[in-house]
Image: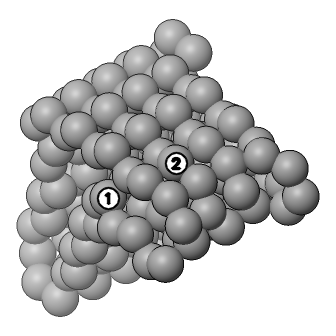
Amino acid sequence: MKTTITALSAAVVLTFGMVAHAADDATSKVDLKNTVQLQGGSGNKQELNAGNVTGKGHSDVKMENTVQLQGGSGNSQKLNAGNVTGGGNSNVKTKNTVQLQGGSGNKQEMNLGNVSGKGTSNVTTENTVQLQGGSGNEQKLNAGNIKN
C-alpha cells in the first residue's frame, strides 16, 4: 500500500489486513506508507485498523507516515494496529505516527501491538505524537500490553 487519502466525511474507517479466524492460526502482514485521514467539522469519527487478528494468530505490521487529522469539536479518532485477540504474537513497527485534533470534547485512542491471551508483543515506535487543542479532550495510548 503506497498512499491512501480519505478526506472530509462524517465517518471514516480504513481497514487493512484484518483477520477474523477462530480455529487455526491466522497471520496478517501489513505494510502501510503515507496514509492520511482528514476531516473537518464536528461529530466526526475516524478509525484506522491495520493487521489486527481475532482468534489465535500472528500479526506483523509496519506503518510509516500515518496521520489522522480532525478539526472541530466532538470528534473521535482510533488507530488500532497489530492487536491480537485469542492468543498469539504481535510485531509492530511505526515511524512518524500522528493523531491531531483541534477543538473541544474530542477523543483520541491509539492501540499498538496489544495481545489478549497467551502470547508475545514486540512494539517499536519512532516519532509518535498525540496532540489536542481545546478543552475537555481525552487521549489514550496503549502499546505492547498483554492480558493473559
Q: How is the image coloured?
A: one colour
Judging by the rendered image, the residue that carries numbered circle 1 is 144
For this rendering, which residue is in front, 143 or 50?
143
Disc 2 is placed on an element classified as: strand
Q: In this view, does 105 lie to the left or right of 25?
A: left
Judging by the rendered image, the residue that carries numbered circle 2 is 89
Label annotation for residue 133: none
The amino acid type, in three-letter code, at marker 1 is Gly
For this rendering, which residue is in front, 82 or 57?
57
Q: Can residue 10 be seen in this view?
A: no
x 17%, y 88%: residue: 136
Q: What is the crowding at mark 1: few (fewer than 14 residues within 10 Å), some, or many (at least 20)?
A: some
Residue 17 lies in quadrant:
top right
Q: What is the crowding at mark 2: few (fewer than 14 residues within 10 Å), some, or many (at least 20)?
A: many
Residue 85 lies in quadrant:
bottom right
x 37%, y 78%: residue: 74
Disc 1 is placed on an element classified as: loop
Q: In this view, does 116 lie to the left or right of 69?
A: right
The amino acid type, in three-letter code, at marker 2 is Asn
x 10%, y 67%: residue: 133
x 54%, y 67%: residue: 118
* Residue 128 x/y as whole percent: 16, 44
Labels 1, 2: front one: 2
Residue at the outermost top position: 2
Residue 79 lies in quadrant:
bottom left
In the picture, the quarter occupied by the N terminus is top right
Give the CA distance from mark 1 to mark 2.
Answer: 11 Å
* Residue 80 x/y as whole percent: 48, 55
* Residue 108 x/y as whole percent: 31, 68
